[in-house]
Amino acid sequence: GRVIPCDFIGVMKSQQPVYLRGEVVNNHDELMSNFFAQPDALAYGKTPEQLKKENVSEHLIPHKIFTGNRPSLSILLPTLDAYRIGQLLAIYEHRV
């Protein structure tokens, strides 16, 4: 198959911060952790050896293996407002 680049767009300041009682991190912190982890995963992939070191069950290993070397672009915005959306539109207009 063909490799299709992936774009990740993150926002530093949440418009709807949610803090759950008793939780160490809020939902936005978890989303941002995933925002930074996904491009790394696409770049480096996962091998069976890495999964064994992470103590993944043997029957799950075939389902968690994936190749790396997949291009991605990460865009981190300070806030999400009309100005930033205009910037995103301009970026995508000039890329095509």
Image (cartoon, rainbow, N blue to C red):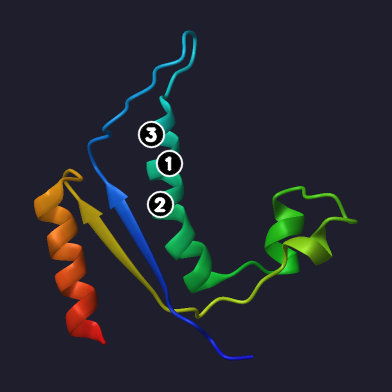
Q: Judge left or right: residue 85 versus residue 1.
A: left
Callout 2 secondary element: helix
Query: Percent from the top left, x then y, of residue 71?
Result: 42, 79
User: For mark 3, what is the residue?
Assistant: 29
Q: What's the amino acid at mark 1?
A: Leu
Query: From the viewer's perspective, is residue 87 above or below residue 70?
Result: above
**Quick check: 47 left or right of 71?**
right
| In contact (CB < 8 Å): disc 1 and disc 3 | yes
Q: Pinpoint residue 35: horizontal percent, then vertical percent.
A: 40, 51
The vertical placement of 86 against 56, above or below, is below
Residue at x 90% of width, y 56% of height: 59
Q: Residue beneath label 2, please? A: 35
Q: Residue 51, labelled with which disc?
A: none
Q: Nearer the viewer, residue 39 or 1?
A: 1
Q: What residue is disc 1 on?
A: 31
Quarter placement of the C terminus: bottom left
Q: Quadrant of the N terminus?
A: bottom right
Identity, as a three-letter code, of the amino acid under mark 3:
Asp
Residue 91 rendering spot, x and y as whole percentages: 18, 73
Q: Are marks 2 and 1 in contact (CB under 8 Å)?
A: yes
